[in-house]
Amino acid sequence: QVRLVESGGGLVQAGGSLRLSCAASGRAVSSVYLAWFRQAPGQERDFVGSISYGSTSTDYTDSVEGRFTISRDDAKNTVDLQMNSLKTEDTAVYYCAATPVPFRTRVRSNYIYWGQGTQVTVSS
């Protein structure tokens, strides 16, 4: 069992930055892939990015590549999402997720542990 709790959401102007954090607890946290997904109103929950245990591999969806950075601290069991150059289309509820699958995956159903989500609103 892995418990995830996000923090750091809020309101920011377009072009600004925001940093989300996710605190993970439970057994074998350091051995799981951690990821961020987001869900805009009326849309599906989409993959944003993921990071492997040991931070040896990261993966980003095209729309955030170069603007967002995922990092994790396995000693503290945290994973962060640094979001720069934010756009209005980045507005969504952002979810932290974890998967026991031992390889990089963007498939939502592979992620079985989820946080409660944190709202990010980017104004024009």
Image (tube, helix red, strand yellow):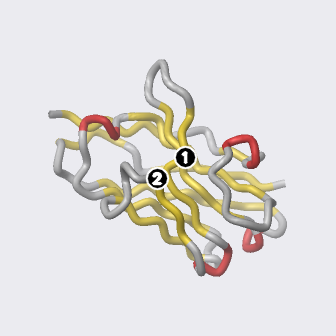
Is the residue 8 above or below the residue 109 in the image?
below
Residue under the image location 56 percent in, 34 percent down: 45
Is the residue 49 above or below the residue 76 in the image?
above
Is the residue 53 above or below the residue 26 in the image?
below
Task: Estimate the x, y position of residue 88 in percent, counting from the top left.
Answer: 25, 36
**Residue that carries the numbered disc 1 in the rendered image:** 47
> If the image is split into quadrants, where does the N terminus sit?
bottom right
Task: Estimate the x, y position of residue 93 in percent, counting from the top left.
Answer: 47, 35
Q: Could you say whether the residue bearing mark 1 is in a helix, strand or loop?
A: strand
Kind of residue sitting beneath label 2: Thr
Find residue 29 and report its image quarter.
Answer: bottom right
Kind of residue sitting beneath label 1: Phe
CA–CA distance in space, label 1 to label 2? 7 Å
Task: Estimate the x, y position of residue 14 in percent, counting from the top left.
Answer: 18, 43
**Residue that carries the numbered disc 2 in the rendered image:** 61
Circles 1 and 2: CB distance less than 8 Å? yes
Q: In this view, does 49 lie to the left or right of 115?
A: left
Quick one: label 1, few (<14), some, or many (20+) residues within 10 Å? Answer: many
Question: What mark, if any, has residue 113 been given in the picture?
Answer: none
Q: Could you say whether the residue bearing mark 2 is in a helix, strand or loop?
A: loop
User: In the image shown, does 32 or 78 lie closer to the viewer?
Assistant: 32
> If the image is split into quadrants, where does the C terminus sit?
top left
Mark sitting earlier along the chain (1/2):
1
Quick one: label 2, few (<14), some, or many (20+) residues within 10 Å? Answer: few
Task: Estimate the x, y position of residue 100 in percent, counting from the top left.
Answer: 80, 60
Residue under the image location 27 percent in, 58 percent down: 84
Residue under the image location 75 percent in, 56 percent down: 99
